[in-house]
Amino acid sequence: MKRELKFAATGLWTWCLVKLSLTAVAGAAGGAEPGDAWLPEGRHPDFVQTNRVDAAAFATLQAEVLVGRLKVHWVPPQGVPREEAKLYLSADAPGRWPARDWRTLDLQEGPGRWEASVPVDRVDVPIVYFVAVGEFQDDRALSEQPPPRMVSPLRVVRPMALGLERPSRVFWPFLDGFEENLTGWRLVSDPSQGFVMERGEPSRNGKWALSLTIPAGKASVTIATTRVRGWQVTQQDASGFSLWLRCERPGGRARFTLFSHLSPVNLLAAPNPMEVEVDEAWRRFDLAFGDFRGLAPGQADLLAVEFLGDGPDRFWVDDLQLLGRWPLE
């Protein structure tokens, strides 16, 4: 152990240790899955430039269970501003990289390291994670974030295998209210044509809603979200989802499509036949998974919503929730 710590003090030996760890994980296929390990076959979100991945700088990045809590910690190199470091988390089995749902946590200063407590809904669901250092902007979608200056390789933690015996929080059907950021949302329409997706007011609850702009001469805008996860729908036996919508001018409409396997080879699309009318007052819309024909709820990766109106026009979205045996407000 003392020898390894001494080696870790130099960039060369730190790099070697990480490479050996990656090789060991890759060679362990078919054996028992480790509780926390590097994930060499994984894929970062598209905003990450692969030449910014710095294995040596993040050799100390790891997860552990302390007093019934899952924590991720990292000893950063000197000169890294803590306020620019973000922990990115995605709860799901490794894979389906184009449509993973990422959330972020700030790293807090601990004794000799930076750390974050990771909320765990299910101890049997893996969590893929990495740390990025850069100028993260809450009002921009993940695909529109400026490339970080420094990024860790991907790791995967399996809470149960690491020793976490029970979830750290109870299941809650609320998926997003836009109070934190827009990491789980994408503007599908081309922003160079004047389409805008941002956090804005008025909100239905809290401070922020998702605001969408249809420019003059255009008739629709499409967004998508990774917040509706197939594994969560299956494990919680969710029957559908609800969201609140409104528009600036009367006569707006919206339609919905669920997708699975976002690749040219295996792509599945299940449009909902219902087209809803959106007006100037907030209104809740409930959609059942059974109405999205041809796609089992457990396959869901991405929910797309197309808003139709005569530009210039604006739409707002708020309070996305799962529907099931639990009561809503």
Image (cartoon, rainbow, N blue to C red):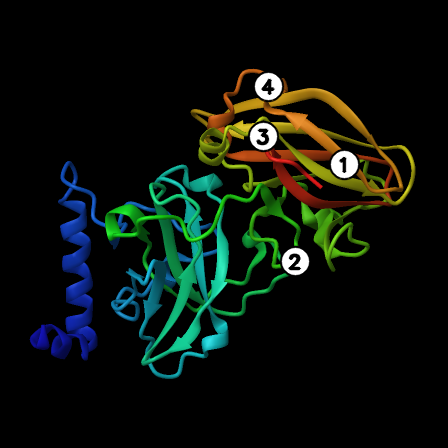
Q: The residue under label 3 is which amino acid type?
A: Arg
> Tag 3 or tag 4, which sits nearer the N-term?
4
Marking on residue 284: 1
Marking on residue 290: 4
User: What kind of element bears circle 1?
Assistant: strand
User: What kind of element bears circle 2?
Assistant: loop
Nearer to us of marks 2 and 3 is 3
3D distance between C-alphas at marks 4 and 1: 19 Å
3D distance between C-alphas at marks 2 and 3: 26 Å
The residue pinned by badge 2 equals 179
Name the residue nearer the viewer: 212 or 237.
237
3D distance between C-alphas at marks 2 and 4: 30 Å
> Tag 3 or tag 1, which sits nearer the N-term?
1
3D distance between C-alphas at marks 4 and 3: 16 Å
Q: What residue lies at 58% left-to-right and 41% top-to-bottom?
A: 173
3D distance between C-alphas at marks 1 and 2: 19 Å
Q: What residue lies at 46% left-to-right and 43% top-to-bottom?
A: 100
Estimate the x, y position of residue 26 in percent, counting from the top left: 18, 46
Residue neighbourhood size for the residue with mark 2, other residues' Cα within 10 Å, grouped as few (<14), some (14–19), many (≥20): some
Q: The residue under label 1 is which amino acid type?
A: Arg
User: 27 above or below 262?
Assistant: below
Name the residue nearer the viewer: 16 or 285.
285
Q: What residue lies at 42% left-to-right and 53% top-to-bottom?
A: 168
Q: Do tag 4 and tag 3 residues touch (Cβ < 8 Å)?
A: no
> Where, by quadrant of the figure, is residue 188 drawn?
top right
Q: Could you tell whether 190 is left or right of 158 in the image?
A: right
Residue neighbourhood size for the residue with mark 3, other residues' Cα within 10 Å, grouped as few (<14), some (14–19), many (≥20): few
> Tag 1 or tag 4, which sits nearer the N-term?
1
The answer to whether residue 158 is visible is: no
Marking on residue 325: 3
Residue neighbourhood size for the residue with mark 4, other residues' Cα within 10 Å, grouped as few (<14), some (14–19), many (≥20): few
